Image (cartoon, rainbow, N blue to C red):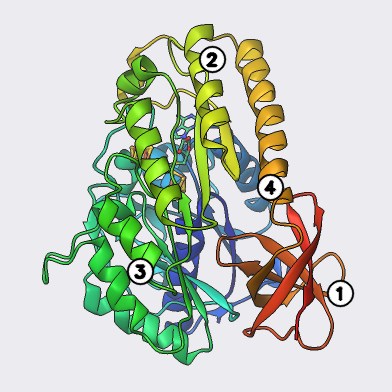
């Protein structure tokens, strides 16, 4: 039987999809390997969200097709389809975002699979550990003008509560203590069978024995409601962390982006979150240099960042995507100006993040121990409920166990923790 190595790019949903492919392949008799060199087949699970993501995947394809049977899967496969096969004739198969559970057949037949396809959720082959991913919905209906996701992932569809709870119980049985619920916009989750919304799903998930923490991302600001905020405030298991991408602090930019909220509405939601939830973390994504972004617009983003005081922020320079609405708008912020704005905000956010984190030094938190530190094997790594990384020494820090730790020192964005008896 062929041995398969899966290389994953892109977002957390891609990580989950790779585990789905691994599950489907293992059931079909294939051997999944973590070692690239011993693989007969390489599946490259790709991302299309920025030009840079596609370029990186391309260079890996170019390298792998020289020695291995190569399947390109995921978002870029969906986006480029037959064009990819033309560009790299040695590619064995191109499989879009509705074919993850059919990987076995694809490895036998080869070809281009980008239309049709089913979305069966078969076995998920997780790597084992304390924290596991679970996709609760696929696709996106928001059509932000810059974004390719709705085109490569299709219409929004939620998995039934029943199926999610079933999978969660399975994870608990495998020893997982924490689950990360994934979706492009978890706030618009709706189960067609039971009518449950996202808050209801979370409350049902809290009932699963063995799962001690539930995280979720991504929250869309326009759909985040106070029911969810109240639930997170009330339920011990729901982690006080919101990843709430703002993209810009300028109303005219937000409008051209088709985001569906103003800066003031965004700020009202973040203050609501902070009022109700103690020690909550709020993180964000910011898109820099979108079409027509003036210095004034940029300064509005700077102000918003200063006002919200994010724990951390991912920042991206705008990159035009073919087929999106914004492709028609001029990409008129010069690259060096995008870079200047990016660096300015990176600096600012670094200071803010440090200030926010420094205030936690000297305090005690529950830390779920995840495993060994990659950097220093004398330490175990864990996280607080509000998603701070903590490194802890000593024999009591066992993976899967929650310890009470004092945060003694800040190192970069992580903490050193000492177990309290
Ligand atoms: N569904 C999530 C995440 C979408 S993709 C959301 O709505 O926030 C993750 C991030 O990539 C986005 O938040 C955005 O900041 C960035 N992004 C999306 N399209 C982009 C583009 N064309 N150029 C640069 N960054 C982009
Ligand atoms: Fe893209 Fe907007 Fe959907 Fe997020 S909400 S995936 S940015 S279209
Ligand atoms: Fe994720 Fe990139 Fe696809 S962000 S949904 S892998 S385009």
Determine whether label 1 and label 3 are within 8 Å by CB: no
Q: Image point 41% across, 9% down: which residue?
A: 330
**Mark 2 CB near ligand 1 (8 Å cut):** no
| On screen, residue 185 above or below 207 | above
> Residue at label 1?
377
| Residue 327 percent across, percent down from the top left | 37, 19
| On screen, residue 90 above or below 381 | above
Labels 4, 1: front one: 1
Q: Image point 68% across, 21% down: which residue?
A: 344
> Residue at label 3?
102
Say left or right for 389 vs 297: right
Q: Which of marks 1 and 3 is nearer the N terminus?
A: 3
Task: Calculate the distance from the C-alpha at mark 1 to the C-alpha at mark 3.
Answer: 39 Å
Instruction: Return the mark for residue 299.
Output: 2
Labels 2, 4: front one: 2
Q: Image point 46% across, 92% down: which residue?
A: 173
Pick out the residue farthest to the bottom: 173
Labels 2, 3: front one: 2
Determine whether label 2 and label 3 are within 8 Å by CB: no
Labels 1, 2: front one: 2
Q: Which of marks 2 and 4 is nearer the N terminus?
A: 4
Task: Calculate the distance from the C-alpha at mark 4 to the C-alpha at mark 1.
Answer: 33 Å
Say left or right for 143 vs 277: left
Q: Which of marks 4 and 1 is nearer the N terminus?
A: 4
| Residue 137 percent across, percent down from the top left | 30, 60
Q: Which of marks 1 and 2 is nearer the N terminus?
A: 2
């Amino acid at each position: 039987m062929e041995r398969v190595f899966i290389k994953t790019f892109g977002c957390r949903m891609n990580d989950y999809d790779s585990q789905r492919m691994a599950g489907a392949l293992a059931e079909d008799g294939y051997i999944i390997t973590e070692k690239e060199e011993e693989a007969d087949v390489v599946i490259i699970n790709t991302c299309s969200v920025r030009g840079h993501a596609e370029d990186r995947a391309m260079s890996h394809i170019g390298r792998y097709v020289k020695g291995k049977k190569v399947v390109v899967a995921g978002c870029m496969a969906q986006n480029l389809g037959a064009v990819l096969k033309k560009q790299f004739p040695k590619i064995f198969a191109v499989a879009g975002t509705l074919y993850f559970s059919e990987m076995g057949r694809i490895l036998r037949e080869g070809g281009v699979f980008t239309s049709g396809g089913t979305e069966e959720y078969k076995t998920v082959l997780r790597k084992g550990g304390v924290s596991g991913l679970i996709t609760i919905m696929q696709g996106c209906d928001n059509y932000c003008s810059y974004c390719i996701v709705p085109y490569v992932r299709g219409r929004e569809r939620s998995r039934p509560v029943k199926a999610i709870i079933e999978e969660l119980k399975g994870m608990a049985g495998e020893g997982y203590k924490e689950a990360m619920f994934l979706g492009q916009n978890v706030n618009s989750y709706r189960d067609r069978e039971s009518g449950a919304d996202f808050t209801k799903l979370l409350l049902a998930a809290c009932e699963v024995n063995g799962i001690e923490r539930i995280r979720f991302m991504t929250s869309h600001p326009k759909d985040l409601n106070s029911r969810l905020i109240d639930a997170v405030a009330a339920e011990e298991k729901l982690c006080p962390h919101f990843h709430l991408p703002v993209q810009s602090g300028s109303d005219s930019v937000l409008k051209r982006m088709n985001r569906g909220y103003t800066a003031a509405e965004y700020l009202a939601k973040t203050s609501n979150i902070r009022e109700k939830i103690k020690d909550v973390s709020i993180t964000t994504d910011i898109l820099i240099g979108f079409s027509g972004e003036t210095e004034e617009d940029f300064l509005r983003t700077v102000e918003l960042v200063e006002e919200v005081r994010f724990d951390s922020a991912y920042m991206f320079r705008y990159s035009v995507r073919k087929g999106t609405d914004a492709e028609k708008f001029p990409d008129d912020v010069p690259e060096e100006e995008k870079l200047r704005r990016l660096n300015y905000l990176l600096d600012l956010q670094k200071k803010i993040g440090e200030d926010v984190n420094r205030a936690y030094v000297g305090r005690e938190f529950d830390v779920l121990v995840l495993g060994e530190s990659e950097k220093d094997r004398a330490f175990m790594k864990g996280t607080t409920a509000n998603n701070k990384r903590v490194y802890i020494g000593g024999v009591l820090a066992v993976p899967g166990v929650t310890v009470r730790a004092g945060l003694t020192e800040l190192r970069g964005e992580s903490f050193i923790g000492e177990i309290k008896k």
